[in-house]
Amino acid sequence: MSDDSLAIRTLTTDDLPAFSSVLVRAFLSDNAEGLQYREGLVFEPERSHGVFDGDELIGSGELLTRKITVPGAGQTPIAAVTSIGVAPGHRRRGVLTRIMRAQLHGLHEDGGEAIAALWASESVIYPRFGYGLGAQFYRAKLRSKAAFRPGVELETERVREVARAEAIPLIKAIYEKEAPLRVGALDRPESAWEFNLDDREVRHKGSTEMKFAVLSDGYAIYRVKSDWDEEGPRGTLTLHELVATTPRAYATLYRFLLDYDLIGTIELNAALDEPLIHILADPRKMSRSGGDSLWVRLVDVDRALVTRRYNAPVDLVFGVHDDFCPWNTGNWRLTTDGDGNAEVTRVEDAPDLDLDVIDLGAIFLGGTRPSTLAAAGRIKERTAGAVSRATAAFATDREPSCLESF
């Protein structure tokens, strides 16, 4: 239901306090000062929208200017959707729909980013607006002192736990080397680094400040929390981020964390294809539970599909359905050459595959296979073998991974 008494407009820097207040109320918090500080680190008012009931701001949404690593082509611009919130008492009035329309239709009309993505607070919401589940992750708990399998190679260089000021330039250099190679990883302008490394005491939640462990080819950022019982120390190490550019650095950093004194459990978020479980002598030392991470939306099908490279030559017509962004509805021919470069054109030919734009978003980064969606009844094969050809073309060497919530 849409309420015609509401108005939507682009925000200004003066709106930041009200913007933060909406988010505090929407996400059941009372830390308005802290949230306003964090939002202010990345706030792009000219890319933010507010829905007003009279003079009261009751709904918000923002687009961050970021880049994401897409298959075979490195980093490409993405509209990173964030700060979506509707104040209690104002739901079911069409506020979210107005914000989504302003964002997606605005990107299309202005020739902005061809791809949008977000982390969803509630996973049932965003498919209504064409977002598909493009990447997943798992939450893991790992017992400290867990042994590695025989033959795991470690660096001869010792891991150093260093102060924040010394660590930051080192970790930035390593991240900027690795992120363009990992599908789903985001670039990090200075504002994003400040946001991710915000370490005010209110964020510690009983743990220490951030700690930094570094090698020449990798780093780990983590917090530790002391705990004891009648059997001795049972502390928790919460891993914020681990990036390594070589298998040896990767194993060495995890060996350092596993052997951390007075720790009983290591908690982390990990990519679906995280190598860690394969270097443990006993994989059951790590328990896992899955979750969704990045939801992907193709704003303009033709502009988005040509930003990535494809794993196999293909010539297929996709019959796309898109109720929220109707300019995408129609038949689109995707042709790729031997180098994976693509051309996308609107055609009148009968489709080889019928699917919703949601499903195109899901398969775009390679994290969801067309064959999986076909088995779920979401993609309809009209030409024999089309699903297999699409699956081969969209395949990637590794699962996409975006562990950076924004």
Image: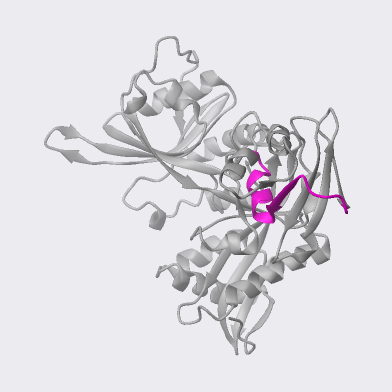
Q: Is residue 130 above or below residue 90?
A: above
Dividing the picture into quarters, in which one does residue 126 lie?
bottom right
Image coords of residue 73 (percent x, y)? 76, 36
Which residues make up the magenta segment?
A: 347-366
342 sits to left or right of 261: right
Q: Is residue 229 left or right of residue 81?
A: left
In this image, 83 relative to 350: left or right?
left
Residue 386 x/y as whole percent: 73, 38
- Residue 276 picture quarter: top left
Residue at 52% x, 63% y: name it: 37
Q: Residue at x 60, y 45 (%)?
A: 373
Location of residue 135 in the rendering, given as x and y in whole percent from the top left corner:
57, 44
Residue 159 visible (yes or no): no
- Locate residue 236, reporting x and y percent: 31, 39
Question: Number of numbered discs present?
Answer: 0
The quadrant of the picture occupied by the C terminus is bottom right
Q: Nearer the viewer, residue 117 or 165?
A: 117
Q: Inspect the magenta stretch and tell me whether residue 362 lies in it.
A: yes
Q: Is residue 341 left or right of residue 147?
A: right
- Residue for point 45% across, 73% down: 25
Quadrant (top left/top right/bottom left/bottom right) for the N terminus: bottom right
Q: Is residue 243 above or below residue 21?
A: above
The front one of 121 and 236 is 121
Outermost residue to the top: 151
In the rendered image, is residue 392 in sight?
yes
Query: Which residue is rendered at x = 69% and y = 40% of the image?
Result: 69
In the rendered image, the vertical position of residue 184 relative to residue 62, given as above or below: above
Whether the magenta-drawn stretch holds residue 50 is answered as no
